[in-house]
Image (tube, rainbow, N blue to C red):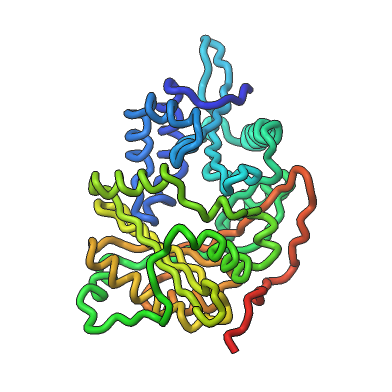
Amino acid sequence: MITERARKRDFDGIKNIFELSFTEEYARREVDIVRRIEKIAAVYPLVKTLSLFPNPYQNLFTVHVARIPQEEGGSAIAGMAQMSPRNAKKTRWHVDNIAVHPDFRGQGIARQLLDDVFAYYIARNAERFTLEVDTLNTGAIQLYEKLGFRRYSTLYYHKMSARTLGGFHDLNEVSVPPGFRLRHRGDDQGLLNLYEQSIPQHIRSVEDRSIADFQRGLLDEGTRWLKKSLKRSEALHWVVEDRQRNCLVASLEISAQLRQLPHVIQMTVNPGYSDLAETLLRFALHQLAQIRINPVLIGSYECQRAKRDAVKTVGFKKLTADFLMVKESLERIMIPTHNEETTEGFSRA
């Protein structure tokens, strides 16, 4: 077996594995994954060029394939692993998708493929690897544990139907909290501080974020402008500032799809201000309903109880629950053995 970065000629094999392994999973998120891969294949020369220098699309489709030589000559794509960096320093790489073709299962290919991929990124200064796995997928969980992964949290995905979103279109009144405003360039440090006050330390240790993860450069701004100009998506970002404390206490970001894909909401609220969660969600849903009536997705960590309660109250339904698992390459991260429901945020009082 040979593991290497995918080439243009591999797209048919990759698409076949995606279709066999992920069609149902992505369909629950209203995403046609096969169609998405076909679009990437159609512009592969551009994708390849963008992968050569830092930009928002540098790792749009970073895939490694497992090749098995065939007796009649040539090779077959037996498995694939899609990876992406999840922090600006690229010390953390995430396994977005891993699958083996049904004809080659039971031969240890997934394990060898991941071992090879991890070695590839460790040689490029990766310190840890993460992945998400459905809490009910015991077979996959056992495989990842054998590979050295440990659970460090649970991530819940929630979905609102387009019909439910439509009910937010004509709200008579949409309130916003004091200090609510659009995010601006000077908020980078404030957003990092908000993150550190809102997310438990054991999760932050894994994610290894820095101020660079909260900065938006000219390429990011240009990408947002281009997507809006092409009527593909529109991104909006607001914050809530406590002016007495001179700090940010909440962040609300929406990615509004102008075509068929689901909208996405990202929201972080300091636990000392948890009562803001429902107000901010209702505002976001009203804004999305004005743009286009599509399904909406949002995620929450197990520690974000107030966020999960607000998500349920406004009409989201739980889509999946995934264990977040981590494998360290350089250091051991202390991970609680219980569900951590407290954070380091300060009280408003």
Choose top left, top right, bottom left or bottom right for residue 197: bottom right
Instruction: Give the left or right position of residue 209, taking residue 282 as reference.
Output: right
Q: Nearer the viewer, residue 314 or 52?
A: 52
Residue at figure coordinates x 54%, y 75% from the top left? 246
The percent coordinates of residue 194 (x first, y second) are 57, 68
| Quarter containing the C terminus | bottom right
Q: Which of 186 and 305 is in front in this view?
A: 186
Instruction: Give the left or right position of residue 175, taking residue 207 as reference.
Output: left
| Quarter containing the N terminus | top right
The reply to whether residue 313 is in sight is: no
The reply to whether residue 27 is in sight is: yes
Q: Give the total of numbered labels.
A: 0
Q: Nearer the viewer, residue 46 or 314?
A: 46
The percent coordinates of residue 289 (x first, y second) are 25, 67
Residue at figure coordinates x 34%, y 59% from the top left? 263
Instruction: Give the left or right position of residue 153, taking residue 265 as reference.
Output: right
The percent coordinates of residue 114 (x first, y second) are 64, 36
Residue at figure coordinates x 54%, y 42% from the top left? 84
Task: Residue lying at the far bottom in this picture: please name it.
Answer: 349
